[in-house]
Image (cartoon, helix red, strand yellow):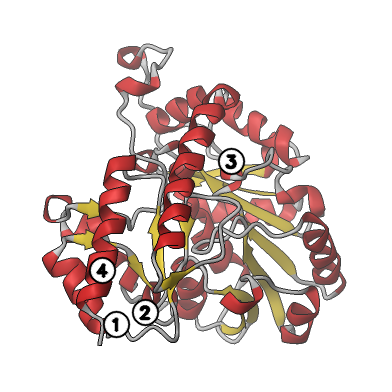
Amino acid sequence: MRYRRMPIEVESPEQIGYDAITYNLAESSMRDRTVGELKLDFDVGATLLLYGDHRGHPGLRALLAAEGGCHPDQVLLTTGAAGALFIVATTLLEAGDHLVVLRPNYATNIETPRAIGATATYVDLAFERGWQWTVDEIAAAMTERTRLVSITTPHNPTGIVFDRSELERLATLVAARGAYLLVDETYRDLTLAEPAPFATALGPHVISVASLSKAYGLPGLRMGWLMTRDSSLNEQFLAAKEQIFITGAVLDEEISYQLYRRRAAERPAIAAAVAAGRGIVRDWIAAESTMEWVEPAGGVVAFPRIKPQAPIDVARFYAALNGEYKTWVGPGHWFEQDDRNMRIGFGWPTHDELKGGLAAISAALRSATR
């Protein structure tokens, strides 16, 4: 493994320092919550800090399994979705193996296979096509050495939700080719419609990954999971977890269980906040002549771009945005895209902060006009 730090981490707000940022539109989750806000129903002081179940909290796994059409023992709790993605990549891929990955994508889905030495073919999504893909494109990208096809829905950074019937067709294709399908569903609970069953319902070769970080504003818990109905593969994933972590944190898992079992009651307020934030960005896009977007249907991020014909000096834009206006977005290079694209998070900032940050983007665009 040859690790390198990813730009999305090197340039992240937590590394820059939150106190150095006035308007933080770079976050990809709901606003962070305090422990007190969760109204926990257990005695923290009486919690025994033992080695827990290696697969993770049985109650939480049972809740997840019921939504994924699998057995609780086919659910593995991990250190965030990032931990799950690392386990999947390092279990399934070796140097020289081939995978197919949608791009743009969350950086870990690209960088970890690259660190392993796997060969990737990227199916590049395009603004002009609404950031959509076709099964035929993925089929054409696969080879005899393809071990894994990796997709994300709702998609990060665009917020696009991929059609369920297309996912079913893709699952059929991948099974016929003898490969595994990884579906990163981290934003599943942030779709406009009722969430579909976890992708594991699509077949035993399908691996679903998700977490509590994005939808519930709990990235500090580091609680994620992966699911597969392939019990033999699940045993390999468990072996990887045991060799890296042994088990999860007992307190994190209990807090996560408490939250997840009442998620139905949590979702309406979250959905209302997300809808309001998306509306603020929609109104800004409509009024900002230099910007355009494909409106997201899920998640709390959008991936608008400076119009190709707009006479903007992109380097000057970011220099003004970060330096003069102390405002952060996720520039395109975080996702191996042109920096005319930018990821804007509308779930983490307050609505006043979001409006202030968007106004700062407009001001920086004016200052960078050629």
Q: Are marks 3 and 4 in contact (CB under 8 Å)?
A: no
Earlier-in-chain disc, 3 versus 1: 3
Q: Nearer the observer, disc 1 or disc 2?
A: 1
Q: Which residue is mark 3?
A: 189
Q: Which residue is mark 4?
A: 10
Q: Which residue is mark 2?
A: 339
Q: Residue at x 29, y 82 (%)?
A: 314
The three-letter amino acid code for the residue at tag 4 is: Val
Q: Residue at x 53, y 63 (%)?
A: 158
The three-letter amino acid code for the residue at tag 3 is: Asp
Q: Nearer the viewer, residue 10 or 53?
A: 10
Q: CA distance from mark 4 to mark 2?
A: 16 Å
Q: Are marks 1 and 2 in contact (CB under 8 Å)?
A: yes
Q: Which mark is residue 122?
A: none
Q: Nearer the viewer, residue 213 or 239?
A: 213
- Under tag 3, what secondary structure? helix
Q: Nearer the viewer, residue 352 or 26?
A: 352
- Residue 249: x and y in percent read 40, 36
Q: Badge 3 local density, few (<14 within 10 Å), some, or many (20+)?
A: many
Q: CA distance from mark 2 to mark 3?
A: 29 Å
Q: Badge 2 local density, few (<14 within 10 Å), some, or many (20+)?
A: some
- Residue 23: x and y in percent read 23, 53
Q: CA distance from mark 1 to mark 2?
A: 7 Å
Q: Residue at x 76, y 71 (%)?
A: 179
Q: Which residue is mark 1?
A: 314
Q: CA distance from mark 3 to mark 1?
A: 34 Å
